[in-house]
Amino acid sequence: MSVVAASQVVLEGEAWRARRAAHEARADRLVDARRERARKGVPDPVEDFLFTYYPFRLAALRRWTPGAGVALAAFFFALSFIFRSPQPLPSTP
């Protein structure tokens, strides 16, 4: 049996921050109406049920994670100093 390493995407800090900002903007657009109704005390039967039944906070929906197989380039750079790894760092596609 052979083991195949998972492909890894390494993002530079600028790309990482851009992806995070784009996700946060999308999440804000999706939850702004809910926030406004909650602030005014206006009920919405469907959203009230969903946010009561599924205990997701709006802040948790806004939190971005890059997903499996995605890493920050600076992390690998820091690891190379911590562990003095003789292996080359993954290249950015």
Image (cartoon, helix red, strand yellow):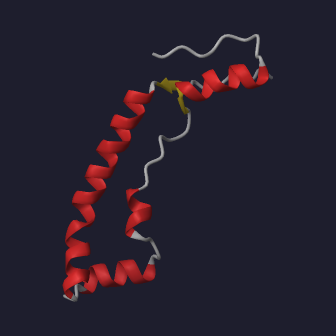
Give residue 50's position: percent from left, percent from top. Answer: 36, 78
Give the residue at x 55% y 26%: 74
The N terminus, quarter of image: top right
Give residue 12's position: percent from left, percent from top. Answer: 45, 24
Give the residue at x 50% y 41%: 67
Side of 28 where 57 appears, left or right: right
Give residue 35's position: percent from left, percent from top. Answer: 26, 74
How many numbered badges does the structure rendering display?
A: 0
Side of 60 where 36 appears, left or right: left
Determine which quarter of the picture holds residue 59: bottom left
Side of 26 where 55 appears, left or right: right
The correct choice, above or below, for 64 with respect to 50 in the image is above
Query: Which is more toward the observer, 61 or 18?
Result: 18
The correct choice, above or below, for 69 with respect to 35 in the image is above
Give residue 93's position: percent from left, percent from top. Answer: 45, 16
The correct choice, above or below, for 71 with respect to 2 in the image is below
Determine which quarter of the picture holds residue 82: top right
In the picture as drawn, the residue positioned furthest to the right comes out as 1
Give the residue at x 60% y 29%: 75
Give the residue at x 43% y 49%: 64
